[in-house]
Amino acid sequence: SGSEAGSPPPRALALPPPRSPPLPPASFSQLVRVRVLDLSRAGLVALPPGATALTSLVELTIRGASAYPGAGFAWDSLAHVPTVRALDISESHLDELPSALAALPRLRALAADDCSLARLGACPPGLTSLSANGNRLAWLPAGELAAVPGLVCASLRDNLAMQLPADLARLGALPSLSILDARKVARGVGGGAPWSARSMWALARAHAALARFCRRFAAEGG
């Protein structure tokens, strides 16, 4: 009929991109000198065993590796590239950092921005730089960060719901931490300068003093 002819076509459903077939080992056999590799949004389900040929690889980017809930990525396959020192897994759908990151003994810099992280979980202990901006962290993860003894810089911007934890003073035990960028936590929506080690430690001391006062006040029946 005329009304049917003039009606708009049905709207197509937005579906995740198709997954790529596994790459054959020969795909990497000629890349032994490659130091930087970007496989972002490539639709891979895992790094293939042939990636072990990338013996010079130091920087790997796989943004959006698991960008959709239920569309998982085999994080255990990172064991095929143990030489990686810098890894970017941003825009992947994760509740916490994959435990498989422990398979990267040389990993020093990790970017996990916009991953929907509700908690950090276990951070790779060798990190010196961590970026976890734009996630869903409810508390500044002082305990998890304190377990990374060589941490120098941590960026946790735009975790809009994040609050300061009771164990904030644990960060004072990190001898190398010089930058903690947690803007929009306690400095307002407009942000401010990243926290230096001195300002962070002053805040931790103030927090501890307030906690002692509250305990004394409660003990005295105030």
Image (spheres, helix red, strand yellow):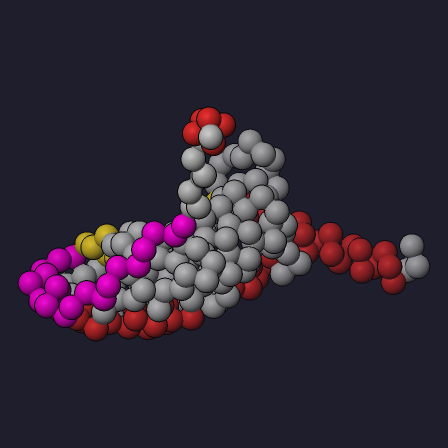
Can residue 201 be seen from the camera position used here?
no
Horizontal arrangement in the rendering, residue 6 relative to residue 24 (left or right):
right
Where residue 68 appears, as percent x and y from the top left, is 43, 55
Where residue 139 appears, as percent x and y from the top left, is 60, 55
Where residue 52 appears, as percent x and y from the top left, is 18, 71
Task: Place residue 218 in its image quadrant.
Answer: bottom right
Q: Residue at x 55, y 64 (%)?
A: 143
The mark total stands at: 0
Instruction: In the displayed orientation, state which residue is furthest to the left.
Output: 30
- Stretch of the chain drawn in magenta: 15-35
Q: Is residue 17 magenta?
A: yes
Compared to residue 142, the image places residue 196 above or below, namely above
Can residue 115 be seen from the camera position used here?
yes
Instruction: In the displayed orientation, state which residue is furthest to the right.
Output: 221
Where residue 184 appears, as percent x and y from the top left, is 57, 40
Which of the image's four quarters has the C terminus? bottom right
- Identify which residue, 45 or 191, lies in the foreground: 45
- Identify which residue, 196 or 17, lies in the foreground: 17
Q: Identify the main secondary structure in magenta.
A: loop
Q: Is residue 24 magenta?
A: yes
Horizontal arrangement in the rendering, residue 210 relative to residue 7 (left or right):
right
Compared to residue 59, the image places residue 9 above or below, namely above
Q: Residue at x 36, y 68 (%)?
A: 75
Q: Residue at x 42, y 66 (%)?
A: 98
Q: Residue at x 32, y 55 (%)?
A: 18
